[in-house]
Image (tube, grey):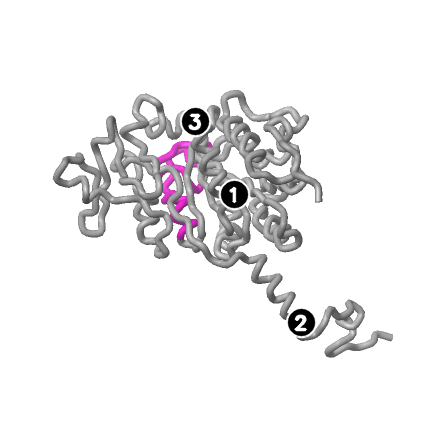
Amino acid sequence: MTATPTLSKADFTSDQIVRWCPGCGDYAILSAIQATMPKLGLAKEKFVFVSGIGCSSRFPYYMNTYGFHTIHGRAPTVATGLKIAQPDLSVWMITGDGDGLSIGGNHLLHILRRNPDINILLFNNRIYGLTKGQYSPTSEQGKKTKSSPMGSVDTPINPLRFALAAEASFVARTYDTNVNHMSEVFLEAAAHKGTSFIEIYQNCVIFNKDAFDDVYDRRQREDHMIHLQAGEPLLYGKEEKRGIFLNGLEPEGRPVTDDNIDNVLVHDPTQKTKSYANLLAEMDHPEFPVPVGVFRKVARPTYEDAVWDQVADARAKKGDGKLVDLFGEGDTWEVD
């Protein structure tokens, strides 16, 4: 066996011209991924990026790895088949709030419940960018766009709650203005055995500019975001003087004092039930600080392992068999 070569970010940068709008948050996500891949200790030919349709789905062209640019909403199908056929590959699926949660919602649900060892990055800019600014499944109610000139009346999808409802074993959120945080989350996702679902807050400078500035702008980030760290209390605000408490079954943000600091919720993403992760996923600005980091991380069997266990069991009972015998067994007939 040969040693895995030492790789750098440049090894994962393709020769293709990156065709996103200047200032698009996708550039930062691409940079973070290209910088993260060398840290995983795999040969470059072990990586595959699979995408659907949308601005985010140009991603495979810009990664110097194997890749599939598939059809609208169907990236989970291709990624799942690929992982079953080649379980040793590191498979990364790129999608957006439209591609993944609208036409691809059904496919995304099933990949999450099946739990193949695949990393899913969902770029959420709350708009359809590629098709020029229609409202998307994550757009807020009242959003005025070309397809909702009087304001959207749809209730938006919360991507994290969608993933949790589909039994995702790893659920996280990060944001495009913090490359270090993105890289940390990507590394933790890659280390997880099972489907990792990561929502990325991403800015569309043309059709939904500053969509998340009220949350992650540097001037107010301390008060409007909470960074999740396993085993650490849920503290936020300047000098971390506010915390998240439980009032019955409801979360509540209030000042931290010497008398109540022991009652601040402590983050534990390994809880088997989804109640705690859902509680965090429901927290939203302006009522709460928006959590970022790993919400849930639990162990359960992967889809490809279960499939190959069945193959091994069938071989043990019946032998390898021959394809011609398979075609000829059971009820057959001849056509004159």
- Depth check: 77 or 1 in front? 1
Span colored in magenta? 137-164
Q: Is 148 a magenta residue?
A: yes
- Which x, y percent locates residue 322? 78, 69
Q: Earlier in the sequence, mark 3 or mark 2?
A: 3
Q: How many marks?
A: 3
- Which x, y percent locates residue 170? 44, 48
Question: Could you tell me which secondary element the residue under label 3 belongs to?
Answer: loop
Image mark for residue 316: 2
Q: CA distance from mark 3 to mark 2?
A: 52 Å
Toward which corner of the image does residue 333 lie, by quadrant? bottom right
According to the picture, the residue beneath numbered tag 1 turns out to be 190
Q: Earlier in the sequence, mark 1 or mark 2?
A: 1
Crowd band around label 1 with a 10 angstrom C-alpha radius: few (<14), some (14–19), many (20+): many
Q: CA distance from mark 1 to mark 2?
A: 32 Å
Query: Which amino acid lies under the numbered mark 1 shown in the image of this protein?
Result: Ala
According to the picture, the residue beneath numbered tag 3 turns out to be 177
Question: Could you tell me which secondary element the residue under label 2 belongs to?
Answer: helix
Q: Is 107 a magenta residue?
A: no
Query: Which amino acid lies under the numbered mark 2 shown in the image of this protein?
Result: Ala
Q: CA distance from mark 3 to mark 1?
A: 21 Å
Q: Is residue 304 left or right of residue 222?
A: right
- Depth check: 165 or 105 in front? 165
Query: Which amino acid lies under the numbered mark 3 shown in the image of this protein?
Result: Thr
Disc nearest the viewer among 3 and 2: 2
